[in-house]
Amino acid sequence: MNRKELNATAYKMMAPGKGLLAMDESNPTCNKRFAKIGIPQTEAARRDWRELIVTTPHLAESISGAILYDETIRQNTKDGTPIINAISDAGIIPGIKVDMGAKPMAGYPGEKVTEGLDGLRDRLQEYARLGARFAKWRAVIEIGAGIPSRACIEANAHALARYAALCQEAGLVPIVEPEVLMDGSHDLKHCFDVTLEVLRTVFSQLYQQGVMLEGMILKPNMVIPGSDCPDQATVAEVAVATVNCLLQAVPAAVAGIAFLSGGQAGELASAHLNSMHVQFGARLPWPLTFSFARAIQQPAMDIWHGKAANVSIAQQALNHRAKCNQAARRGEYSSEMEMMLKDQFSKQAIMTSITLFVSSGLLT
Ligand code: 13P
């Protein structure tokens, strides 16, 4: 294990004012999101979408690293450039999702354990050869009647730590993602308790398996009431509960923490991250940033709709969300900023539509 190199990569991934972009949806997940808005579920469409993302002008100003899926790391842009090269050339560090998905756990109905350890050493070596510098593994913990069980938490924590140790051996920085899902009617305190137990179990396993904390990144959920809970929390309450939970479970040596969005609306995810920085600021022992997928991609995907004519406007929407999260990471995000950028964005969108209309020859 090259400790210095791992630490240097993790440090770059957590660069001040930047965060990570998750664009590693598996084919079934990506297809599901395309189907919802009528985009064809083909390899070409998935390639076009990922090309749109990685060629977004100025993205590297707010995004330090991008997490890819196996299909994407092997694809080329339309002009024949490997997508992974397009990312590196843009100044963004490429990473790769390496788990094989959360599967039903034998003997524990309603719970899941993430698979993918078999053959992982060889796959990691291949990904490193292809140019990946970091990896991601997601475990899923659901809150419900009588769940999560200790068995589910321990099995997932064990797999996360085994994966992380193998990544560091291969020279890749592991992103360790134990996600406590937002689905359900549990309250804020219940999410806090489960998240705390999960994180403590994960760090105990990471310690047992000799994972270097300075060369890994934690990707947790925020502490939020379940989406069906009648007693929703304020932005400030979520921020306080989340940071207090992390402070009690995550050693200060960890290179950084980058949140998943978990299905929160983009603006709310930004507001939560912002509030953590406003309320805790310099008291945070680790860099605290974002590693969102839906909360960055969704508005842009809605605009794109699979149409080449919409690429530029969709890229502006993507950059807009990335910039809002950059501001949130600095504790400088505000709804005014959101409105101002949106305003500027819609003016540009109107101008682009007029240009497209004129160049289509419909207006003479
Ligand atoms: P969301 O931000 O959409 O939750 O996705 C993050 C992620 O990478 C899930 O593994």
Image (spheres, rainbow, N blue to C red):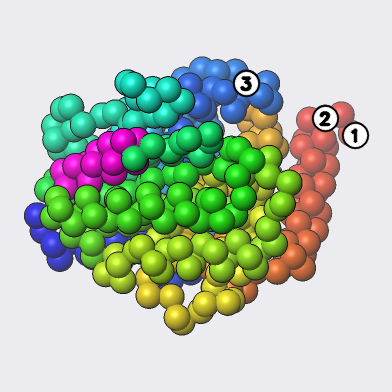
Q: Nearer the viewer, residue 354 or 104?
A: 104
Q: Nearer the viewer, residue 199 or 168?
A: 199
Task: Indicate if the residue with disc 1 has its beta carbon within 8 Å of ligand 1.
Answer: no
- Asked if the residue under mark 2 is in contact with the one under mark 3, i.e. CB atoms within 8 Å, the reply is no
- State the SS at label 1: loop
Label 2 CA crowd tier, 10 Å (few <14, some 14–19, many 20+):
few
Real-space CA distance between mark 3 and mark 1, rounded to the nearest whole angstrom: 37 Å
- Asked if the residue under mark 1 is in contact with the one under mark 2, i.e. CB atoms within 8 Å, the reply is yes
Q: Which mark is residue 364?
A: 1
Q: Position of residue 282 (x, y in %)?
A: 46, 82
- State the SS at label 3: helix
Q: Position of residue 193 (x, y in %)?
A: 47, 54
Q: Is residue 35 left or right of residue 111?
A: right
Q: Nearer the viewer, residue 80 or 314?
A: 314
Query: Which residue does the image show at 14% across and 35% down from the upper left?
Result: 121
- State the SS at label 2: loop
Q: Give the extent of the magenta segment.
A: 151-167
Real-space CA distance between mark 3 and mark 2, rounded to the nearest whole angstrom: 32 Å
Q: Which residue is mark 2?
A: 361
Q: Position of residue 43 (x, y in %)?
A: 46, 20
Q: Can residue 202 be seen?
A: yes
Q: Quadrant of the C terminus?
A: top right
Which label's residue is closer to the chain start, 3 or 2?
Answer: 3
239 magenta-colored: no
Q: Which residue is mark 3?
A: 35
Identify the amino acid type marked 3: Ala
Query: Which residue does the image show at 34% across and 31% down from the upper left?
Result: 113
- Asked if the residue under mark 1 is in contact with the one under mark 3, i.e. CB atoms within 8 Å, the reply is no
Within the image, what quadrant is residue 118 found in? top left
